[in-house]
Image: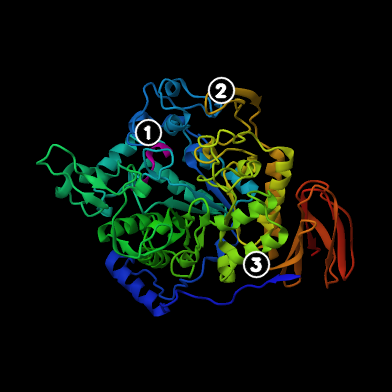
Amino acid sequence: MLDYAWPTVHQMTNDQPLSYYIKRAAFLAASFGIFALGQVQSVAVPFDEPPAWAREAVWYQIFVERFCNGDPSNDPRPEFMQGAYPGYVPANWKVTPWNQDWYEQEDWASADSGGFYKMVQARRFGGDLQGVLGKLDYLQDLGVTAIYFNPLNDSPSLHKYDARHYRHIDRTFGPDPAGDSVIIDAEDPVDPTTWCWTAADRLFLKLIREVHQRDMRLIMDYSWNHTGVTFWAWEDLKKNQTRSRFRGWFDIASFDDPATEENEFSYEGWLGVKTLPELKKVNVVNKRRGYPFEGDLQPKVKQHVLNVTRRWLDPNGDGDPNDGVDGFRLDVAAHVPLGFWRDYRIFVRRINPEVFLVGEAWWTKWPDELMDPRPFLRGDVFDSVMHYQWYKPARRYFAQANGGLKPSEFVAEMKRVYAGYDQSTIQNLMNLTASHDSPRLATSFQNRHQYKYRMSARGNPALDLGPPNETTLREIRMMLLHQFTFVSAPHIWNGDERGMWGGDDPDCRKPIIWEDVDHCPQIYRPDGKKTKPITVKPNLQLLDYYRTLIALRKQRPELVHGKLEYTLVDDRDMTLAYRRTMANRETIVAFNRLDRYQIIRLSRNADKKLKLVAESRPGSLAKWKQTDQEIRFELAPLSGAALGTVQ
């Protein structure tokens, strides 16, 4: 039996005592005006622990533009898209119907010579906040407890990582885009006292209230590393060059010399992408791509970021953060200095001690080496990361992808991935199987080569672009049983619970398949050729399975808080089992990775009776018998089952 014990060391950083953080909190309070007079203050903020609610979270990620169009009257218009890739709005552009065959090009797109993967970036389907409000009952019924929104800030693009205004919700997500434009243009973006609430802002505040009334949480996604080229400070800098009061806000290599004919203006874009100019970093030390580094954001940039952050944490400024968001997902975190992140944690925790910060710490060297997220998880920066580090080895075992893993190799990888973390950190790592930046779970399992590598038809014409076959579905269902019974907080990328498929970005960003929409069959390929029609409809059996697994995790607290023990690791038979225990509660989870029935024998020293609590598919478990010393059962091919103590 292999035993996985929780680490017990609780660290802040390698060299900073708690007094350092208290001093930094005092500095930030003085510098940025955190507290209103009369507000209750608490210095003893538990910087090194995540909020309790995040440890029990079931995450659901929403990409608003593709989630649900609840208000067609606010659909995007060309004037709101200027500045987004591909750099122009095609002639005769129109909003794309929600039910369109994904690879079929619109008339306006086919008239352009750019091809599918260029013109798809100009698509808009009209998803909005009203659509999210209309689906909150669906999410509550599914069992979701926390929503992670992709960027909501005002932006010309479909993804919103190219901010036009950090301080406002995108005008096309709300009910009055034209009116919001008037409000935004009348403000001084630097001065928070001039900031008003747009119609989109107010609708988001309503959404916060509705989410909280359902005992759910929500976090916003921001990139404090870069903006878009329509960002207000960037437009001023580009126009006025050295005369701009924002000339120190961005990473500028050279300004234009008006005495010459050529334009010498040069700057850093994120990863060389010139439509995403990088905000200025200062006091930078040992910066290497793919690794965390020391430094800070330029002071005025930092102040603006903190002002925007405070706006959404405590919208009415009364010192009670219950009307605000519950945290932030922080984009390309390794591109922003650690010094800023430490101050950011202090800042947000002084406003709301239960704020949750989750960072994106993904690649050190794509596509071979994932980043070690530990420098972000020592208690002084983030509470969690998007835990791709779990998914990569899990996919290799359950899908036998990229050469596959034997059970003993899987266990070794999991021990490596989780080594050195305390229990509270382990519990709230965001275990995701897919996201806006990766192929959907179904396509990732259907195509078994290296993780994320050549997972788009743009670079791999042989990629299987259809729904998962029956074998792949069985493997996916085993993977989901593992995800919802394992350590760390499970995450769902919107639409995966409905059986959607799609390759890497942009194909993972199709509009969600809803029952009340008659979706066109998938006929076209990205090259414009036609194939045999594929029916596009939700997999309601899979949806019910997600609902069952979420309910199981909520009903059995040992799946969240319990100890993890590997009790069967058999490389010959490709079987794996682990036990989750807490006090007098126990859940045993077992998997058969081969395509034949197998007998599973597990020793146990307990007199409490077990019952079947979940199967990866009906009929997974058969012929089972238990005594005080042993439990024996038969598992169907490519299946898993969970047995739990009778309470």
Mark 3 and mark 2: span between their CA atoms?
Answer: 51 Å
Q: Tag 1: Cα neighbours inside 10 Å, few (<14), some, or many (≥20)? A: some
Provide the residue span drawn in magenta: 166-173
Q: What residue type is labelled 2?
A: Lys
Q: Does the magenta stretch include residue 343?
A: no
Rendering coords of residue 434 (x, y %)? 57, 47
Q: Residue 86 carries which label?
A: 1
Q: In this view, does 30 lie to the left or right of 369?
A: left
Q: Which amino acid does label 1 sit on?
A: Pro
- Residue pointed to by mark 3: 561
In the foreground, 642 or 530 = 530
Badge nearest the viewer, 1 or 3: 1
Residue 88, by quadrant, is: top left
For marks 2 and 1 on the same chain, the one whose residue lies earlier in the sequence: 1
Q: Circle 1 sits in a helix, a strand or a loop, which is it?
A: loop
For marks 1 and 3 on the same chain, the one whose residue lies earlier in the sequence: 1
Classify the position of the N terminus by image quarter. bottom right
In the foreground, 92 or 401 = 401
For marks 3 and 2 on the same chain, the one whose residue lies earlier in the sequence: 2
Q: Is residue 188 among what the camera can see?
A: yes
Rendering coords of residue 388 (x, y %)? 55, 55
Rendering coords of residue 69 (x, y %)? 50, 34
Mark 1 and mark 3: span between their CA atoms?
Answer: 47 Å
